[in-house]
Amino acid sequence: MDYLTLTIGKQKNIALIAHDSKKRELIDWCEQHKEILKCHFLCGTGTTARMITDATGLPVKGYNSGPLGGDQQIGAKIVEGRIDFVIFFSDPLTAQPHDPDVKALLRIAQVYDIPIANNKATADFMITSKFMNEEYEHSVINFHQNIADRAKTL
């Protein structure tokens, strides 16, 4: 299978997402890492983005709320190559009405080899990584070639 090398730039496009019970934890995390985050482009699902901006002053472009399609909007930005990095403080102990959307987001991040943190410890490791201050090359499946090859065999 053919692969393409993609580059995550020095300035990262970071998506910030949190389930309701984890929003305060993500806001506190953003405040703790404000000096690093202010050097990057930030976006997030609606309520979370608004709360982070209000609490920290960091500019966070807001999409729809998660249950109203925000998770899918973030996933689409990953496919478009416009999200490099996802911080998603999820609540594993509470059922979510939009769980299929969350799973789709996690799946598409994996398909496109996008770093994703689902908790504070992982987010801490990622944000303090040496790769936060430099470009990072990674390989993903050449989807156009894959489609062309599949079309020939069907």
Image (cartoon, rainbow, N blue to C red):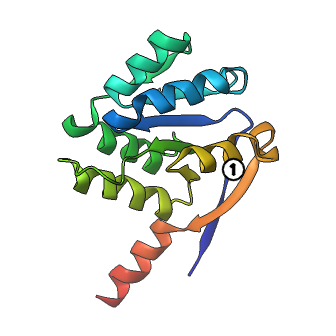
Taking depth in this image into account, of 30 and 147 the one nearest to the observer is 30
Look at the numbered disc 1 and give the secondary structure of its residue: strand
Q: Position of residue 89 (x, y in %)?
A: 45, 42
Whether residue 69 sits left or right of residue 21 in the image: it is left
Whether residue 109 sits left or right of residue 14 in the image: it is left
In the rendered image, the quadrant that contains the C terminus is bottom left
Whether residue 20 sits left or right of residue 123 in the image: it is left
Taking depth in this image into account, of 21 and 109 the one nearest to the observer is 21
Residue lying at the far bottom of the rendered structure: 153
| Residue type, numbered disc 1 | Thr
Residue at point 44% right, 21% down? 61
Taking depth in this image into account, of 60 and 51 the one nearest to the observer is 51
Q: Is residue 20 above or below residue 60?
A: below
Number of marks in picture: 1
Q: Label 1 belongs to which residue?
A: 7
Residue at point 47% right, 67% down? 143
| Pointer 1 local density, CA inside 10 Å: few below 14, some 14–19, many at least 20 | few
Taking depth in this image into account, of 71 and 4 the one nearest to the observer is 71
Q: Position of residue 118 (x, y in %)?
A: 49, 50
